[in-house]
Amino acid sequence: MTIDQIVIGIGGIIVAVLIYFAGVQRGKAQRSLDACEARINRVVDNFASLDPVHRGLDLAEFIRAGAADLRDNPEVVEAARRIVNRGAHHPIPARIRKQIPEDEWLCFLGWCSKNRKPALSDLRNEQETDKFIAKYREREDA
């Protein structure tokens, strides 16, 4: 065996190892994406399974459906988008969406879940909604 053959053999082994690890990383990324899809679908399906006749407070039902347990804000935004695409009202009221940016939605939902909010009285009119948002803004973990 010549030096050239040895170098070519080692090069082939290195390429094979690199291809293997690239495939492992791709598999991990795909599993992560699948898990993300599963979390979003779970929230959307749970929300849809709630009886719309008895559903008076979409934000509370969105939290009950598991939105506060999503991993990040893009997942929350995507779950809300899919709910709207299914023909339901946006689960986060418009006044709240105007005052709390999308990149805070997960934190907001977590705060609501932790504090067992909102109640219908918290969102019955604009003044109560503004008070509710002010309570969120004044939280200790801000």
Image (tube, rainbow, N blue to C red):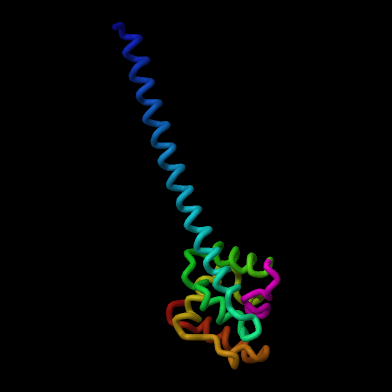
| Rendering coords of residue 113 (x, y %) | 48, 80
Relative to 17, say whether 113 is above or below.
below
- Image: magenta residue range: 86-96
The extreme bottom residue here reads 121
Residue 77 occupies quadrant: bottom right
In front of the other: 42 or 109 = 42
**Residue at 62 percent of width and 76 percent of height:** 92
Query: Left or right of 115: which side holds 127?
Result: right
Would residue 89 be counted in the magenta stretch?
yes
Residue 27 occupies quadrant: top left
| Rendering coords of residue 136 (x, y %) | 52, 82
Query: Left or right of 94: which side holds 28?
Result: left
| Rendering coords of residue 45 (x, y %) | 57, 69
**Residue at 47 percent of width and 57 percent of height:** 35
| Rendering coords of residue 91 (x, y %) | 62, 76
- Quarter of the image with the N terminus in it: top left
The extreme left residue here reads 1
In front of the other: 7 or 52 = 52
Relative to 96, say whether 13 is above or below.
above
Total labels: the figure holds: 0
Helix, strand or loop for the magenta stretch, by majority: loop
**Residue at 46 percent of width and 42 percent of height:** 26
Residue 90 occupies quadrant: bottom right
Relative to 138, say whether 11 is above or below.
above
Would residue 69 be counted in the magenta stretch?
no
